[in-house]
Amino acid sequence: MTSNREMIERDLKAVWHPCTQMKDHETLPLIPFKRGEGVWLYDFDGNRYIDAVSSWWVNLFGHANPRINEAINQQTQQLEHAMLAGFTHEPVIDLSERLIDVTPEGLNRCFYADNGSSAIEVALKMSYHYFRNTGKPEKKNFINISNSYHGETLGALALSDVGLYRETYEPLLMEMLTAPAPDAFYREKGESWEDYALRQFEHMEKLMAENADNVCAVIVEPLVQCAGHMRMYDPIYLKKLREACDRYNIHLIADETAVGFGRTGTLFACEQAGISPDFMCLSKGLTAGYLPLSITMTTDDVFEAFYDDFETMKAFLHSHSYTGNPIGCAVARATLDIFRDDNVIESNREKARIMGESVEHLREHPHVGDIRQHGMILAMELVKDKATMEPFPWQERRGLRVYQHSITREALLRPLGNVTYFMPPYVINEDQIRHLATVATEGIDKATRD
Ligand SMILES: *Cc1c(COP(=O)(O)O)cnc(C)c1O
């Protein structure tokens, strides 16, 4: 029988892992997975772990989900792939129609790519190109907010403000106009999330007013800055931003790559602000954690600015080899079926409530500075000093210690710096949520003891 050890040895000779200092694996063992089922992942030694972070925020309905497996089987027997330039197929048509129905009003066009970063690149290029096509080529800058994350390709990275990923490549990146985030973590004592978001919006408004002539789009992650340590904000900010974008003739790009498909408690986070963006980027949960697929959705207004005779050279000439892959689209269609048939958003409400309740006691913990939640995302931030909110030095890797404890207790609480979070597949049950809370409590105690 193959063991973890054997797999690790082979892996470390051949594979270069993403987002990893490979030398860490001299002391932190890789975990090789053999199979998955529901919320569980199983390694080669027979240990199992609750996938508390949905395998990097992609999995929605558990591993090896029979309904998604079936959708893949059926589609592979029909058509595995065909190019989407000049040709089309049923899964891509179905999926586009279905998404237009369930996304905020006005998003009537779907442009396909195969990962979140590429969906962002499409939105950037389309927004700039829209203004070029409509006689405003000077609108070519972008506004983002601090602590934002939009992916790793150079364009998407330029829009990101998470230093860890960005700093090294700074000389290669487009310049951004950055407004300070509405992140409720920094509100004053006694100040509400909403009041703080309104106060922070004044900086954004000023930046937009001063640069309106040269800015084509503002990009935000609606409600939760996931890679930016699961920092959260009030929906009022999005409402204000939508109004200002209209006032200054600037596009609003909603990056729902991570928060889309129910994570924040509604199918899309924008719904909580009652707004429609000009571009909405979708990936990750789009295929329930099965296949790489992404979509940039946009409006009739944007689409029409490109629609003209060929010689006018207004077309959007962008593509990826696997654009609109039929198997990916069939999986995404099955994902929407499950949301509808199982009333997922509704039943997640009770699960979200249990998640919140299960860690309530940690609010009293001397090193838990903040517990925040939007729907099915719950984050606990460790601090050195609760009175001043002074963080633990990042070099101490406290969050990692929580993780190291978790893997001895059948859970994968992979941290973001000093933040431990739950973002589980929606098939998690009450006992499993309570187990995660127990493991998090033990891990946080251990990680903050000295
Ligand atoms: C993950 C993520 C991306 C990038 O998606 P990839 O598929 O990893 O390229 C972009 N934006 C947000 C908000 C993300 O969380």
Image (cartoon, rainbow, N blue to C red):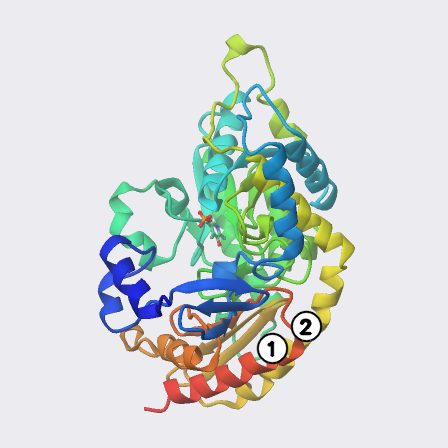
> Looking at numbered disc 2 in the image, what kind of residue is underneath it?
Lys
| Left or right of residue 439: residue 336 | right
The residue beneath circle 1 is: 433
- Pinpoint residue 282: horizontal percent, then vertical percent: 57, 46
The quarter holding residue 383 reads bottom left
Which residue reaches farthest top?
311
Q: Is residue 433 visible?
A: yes
- Pinpoint residue 191: horizontal percent, then vertical percent: 58, 74
**SS assignment at label 1:** helix
- Pinpoint residue 343: horizontal percent, then vertical percent: 77, 59
| Left or right of residue 439: residue 264 | right
Residue at 60% over, 29% down? 302
Q: Quadrant of the N terminus?
A: bottom left
Rate crowding at label 1 as few (under 14), some (14 to 19) or many (20 or more) other CA atoms within 10 Å.
many
Q: Is residue 389 visible?
A: no
The residue beneath circle 2 is: 351
